[in-house]
Image (cartoon, helix red, strand yellow):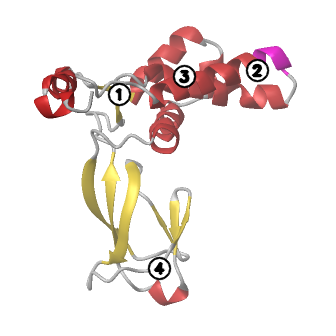
Amino acid sequence: MDKQFFSSREIYVRLTSIYRKKIIEYEPYTIMRWCCQVVSEFIKDGSGMVERTVDLGKPINKMLQLPMDIFKLEKVYSTSTGTIVDYSHQGDYLLFSDDLSITDISCYYTAFMIDDDGFPLIKRGYETACEAFCAYNMYKEDFMEGKINGQMWSDIVNTKDWEIEAASRAWDEVNDNFFKKIQSAQVNIAYKKFN
């Protein structure tokens, strides 16, 4: 496994050690989906993704389920002709018109890399954002039902917001090459003319 990434299963294990009683209500797949949501909807970081083409088959009841590892849907088209088709995107499903009911449909998309167990791999540095978002989702229903007070809920929401914001502004891409470029610009004769 690449050390630049972690499995979303790791977040499930972390949550199990912190929220021992609460985590029983959730499956690892739910935690996996929430972790993917953090990366795809909030941070929107496509690094470490792979491109895939999948034959989805013929629509059933005008619907086809999207692959679970999807990060960004790039193109939906007729498998036989390669012609792009019209669709509506409703969460985990694509919706089609009646005239496409006998057409095999394929899609081209950007996907999360997955581990050996089929869990998405997520870039290191996003662990606490994923953990905070999962805690938020785990306790949302409790707040709505009055099982936790407003201050506790506010702390959970603020932590989630802070961690997602921090992850989206991470300087992980800054490396030695970045600093070398800045340094060479500072000593460049053409640059000095403008000082």
Taking the image as drawn, is residue 109 in sight?
Answer: yes
Q: Can residue 1 be seen at all in this image of the molecule?
A: no
Q: Which residue is mark 1?
A: 7
Contact, mark 2 vs mark 4 (Cβ under 8 Å)? no
> What's the residue type where badge 2 is placed?
Ser
Mark 1 is on which residue type? Answer: Ser
Front: mark 1 or 3: 3
Q: Nearer the viewer, residue 180 or 3?
A: 180
Residue under label 2, please give it.
154
> Could you say which quadrant of the image residue 83 lies in?
bottom left
Residue 52: x and y in percent read 26, 57
Q: Characterize the local packing of mark 2: few (<14), some (14-19) or many (20 or more) Cα atoms within 10 angstroms.
A: few
Asked whether the beta carbons under mark 1 and mark 3 sit within 8 Å of each other, the answer is no
Mark before the other along the chain sequence, 1 or 3: 1
Read off the residue under disc 4.
86
Report how far apart the C-alphas of labels 1 and 3 lie in the structure: 18 Å
Which one is earlier in the sequence, the residue at label 2 or at label 4? 4
Element under disc 4: loop
Range drawn in magenta = 147-152
| Of the pair 36 and 31, the residue shown nearer to us | 36
Q: Which one is earlier in the sequence, the residue at label 4 or at label 1?
A: 1
Mark nearer the N terminus (2 vs 3): 2
Q: Earlier in the sequence, mark 1 or mark 2?
A: 1
The quarter of the image holding the N terminus is top left
Name the residue at the right extreme: 146
Q: What residue is shown with label 3?
A: 163
Does the magenta-highlighted stretch encompass residue 136? no
- Relative to 148, does residue 40 appear above or below in the rendering? below
Mark 1–mark 2 distance (CA, rounded to whole Å):
29 Å
Please tell me the numbered disc located at residue 70. Answer: none
Q: Are marks 1 and 2 in contact (CB under 8 Å)?
A: no
Asked if marks 4 and 1 touch (Cβ < 8 Å), the reply is no
